[in-house]
Amino acid sequence: MDTLFWGLFIFGILYSVVTLIFGEILSHAFDSIFGEGLPFLQPTVLVSGLTAFGAIGILLNRYTAWQSTLILVVAIAGALVVCLLMYFLYIRPMHNTENSTGFSIQDLVGKVGEVSISIPSVGYGEVTLRIGAGLTNQIAASFDKENIPSGTTVVVINVAEDTLYVSPLTKEMLSLQEN
């Protein structure tokens, strides 16, 4: 029994080191084999459970006078607890926070932003827009061919040739947007 516990514990430690070095490759290989249909069967969850099983078994075997059956049951229960904690406190929150900062400039049509560099009636300025969790600064021109001062709230009307064509947002438009 001691050999099983030590084997699983050492396997978990080695897997952790290998994952540290080749984590992305292993993740893609695991996803291609098993798919993403069973998210609770992530390698991190399984290996953390096996490692905990081995470690708990080693400690109970060494520091208690319990019978092998009881040690096995407690080690399995401990491993299940570690698996659940790993999934619900680490894997699931990390999966939910994954997002991309990439966007298409065409996605900016209809977005509201603020002029950061004044936009002349004919020429270019700059607007700042909130995209996801971040901000982006983009080259902008006036859609209505009017001067738009810095600090003005604008809406993107059109995108052409990597330039945002914006129009000032009026108070009426702001009240419609809030509703």
Image (cartoon, rainbow, N blue to C red):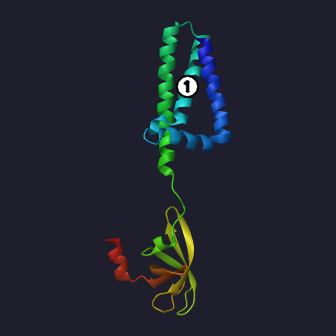
- Residue farthest to the front, as pictured: 33
Q: Residue at x 61, y 12 (%)?
A: 2
Crowd rating for badge 1 (residues with CA inside 10 Å; few <14, some 14–19, many 20+) = many
Q: Is residue 8 left or right of residue 97?
A: right
Q: Pick the residue in front: 178 or 88.
A: 88
- Callout 1 secondary element: helix
Tell me: 3 left or right of 98: right
Question: Residue flagged by tag 1: what amino acid is it?
Answer: Leu
Q: Residue at x 47, y 15 (%)?
A: 73
Q: Is residue 18 above or below residue 152?
A: above
Q: Is residue 32 above or below residue 142?
A: above
Vertical placement of residue 68 versus 169, above or below: above
Q: x%, y% of residue 60?
A: 57, 14
- Residue 157 image offset from top left, x and y in percent: 43, 81
For the C terminus, the quadrant is bottom left
Q: Is residue 34 visible?
A: yes
Q: Is residue 90 visible?
A: no
Q: Is residue 139 above or below residue 76?
A: below
Q: Quadrant for the N terminus, please.
A: top right
> Picture coordinates of residue 97 (x, y %)?
50, 51
Q: Which residue is mark 1?
A: 50
In the image, 10 versus 136, the foreground residue is 10
